[in-house]
Image: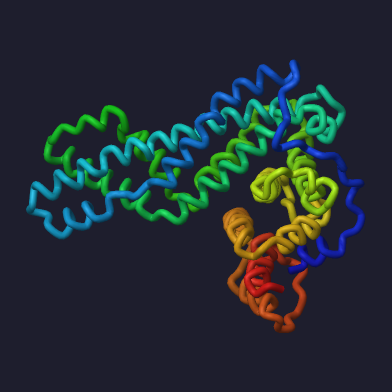
Amino acid sequence: MGNLLKVLTCTDLEQEPNFFLDFENAQPTDAEREVWEQVDIVLKDAKGILDELQAYKGAGQEIREAISNPNDEALQEQAWAAVVPLVGKLKKFYEFSQRLEAALHSLLGALTSETYEDPTQHLEREQALAKQFAEILHFTLRFDELKMTNPAIQNDFSYYRRTLSRMRINNVPAEIENEVNNELANRISLFYADATPMLKTLSDGTTKFVSENKNLPIENTTDCLSTMATVCKVMLETPEYRSRFTSEETVSFCLRVMVGVIILYDYVHPVGAFAKSSKIDMKGCIKVLKDQPPNSVEGLLNALSRVSSSVREDVCSGRVLQQCWRSSQGQRVKQREDGCVCCSITALTHMSKEGR
């Protein structure tokens, strides 16, 4: 828990940016319009993707019957007929993730350019692009929440691949293979194998953006992310700003965006979000999360925990996690100076569940 304790006692953060980012009504200026229109084409399809994912029921019943009766050709055909259109949907979701990554690159290119001196000026003067960036993050966390609660997605695709393999062995033609060939099926399978596939796509995309733009200091990207997180935190904890939200949905939106940029920052920044040198006020961000109704933020805390675990798993031992668990239960444990992000968030998640 050492890094967490450093964060919680750190008081030398730079002066926070203090302005209202209008997530509800921001409109593009002439300078923003070209990038805004490119990204808007992608975002217009985002709600439809979420609606389709939320309505995704899967072919569990048909698959179970086919597996239980392997010699019944009618049941095999029924299961295949049920799975094929679902695979088409899963392919559509995967392809949208690629479009979303391209849109992210366009926004990062604009928001980290040398047009303005610092990220605060970018976000304050390019609010329509900042709003689109926020909408991508909001969509991403919502998509992953829905995916995680729907095991039918991976079950359906696994059945599809097994059945397609048998059909190839038996020389049975399958028209859908023209749309989802073996290479694409491998990529789709890897995409859904991740607990948070959209977030991983954005994290990898942000890292790729940094590596492809070597002439652009990495600080331009990380400072953009940290500033966005800080702006969200300030708006949520400042009554004057929060009262300007016309809907409670905007509060939820702002919370998701804050968590999303923290995760991206932790993924891209060499030392992560919880280091003492981090430009994100993690103490303040966590306080904002804990001040919300517990049921409304548990998923966000879990998102932080999952991503931090995957990034730091090489330095986090079971003994450290056990100590964090005991600490979160109120037991006295020796403070550690080599705590990691995963440990810190794990403890915070358990404390949040206990209402402490």
Of residues 125 and 296, the one drawn nearer to the viewer in this rendering? 296
Of residues 347 and 40, the one drawn nearer to the viewer in this rendering? 40
Can residue 314 be spotted in the picture? no
Which residue is depicted at the point 44% across and 32% down?
95
Q: Position of residue 41 (x, y in %)?
A: 55, 24
Which color scheme does this rendered protein use? rainbow
Q: Residue furthest bottom?
A: 331
**Residue 182 figure quarter:** top left
Q: Position of residue 279 (x, y in %)?
A: 82, 48
Specify whether 240 is left or right of 267. right
Q: Quadrant of the C terminus?
A: bottom right
Can residue 294 be spotted in the picture? yes
Which residue is depicted at the point 56% across and 43% down?
140
Which residue is depicted at the point 72% across and 51% down?
272
Q: Position of residue 332 (x, y in %)?
A: 74, 83
Specify whether 155 is left or right of 118. left
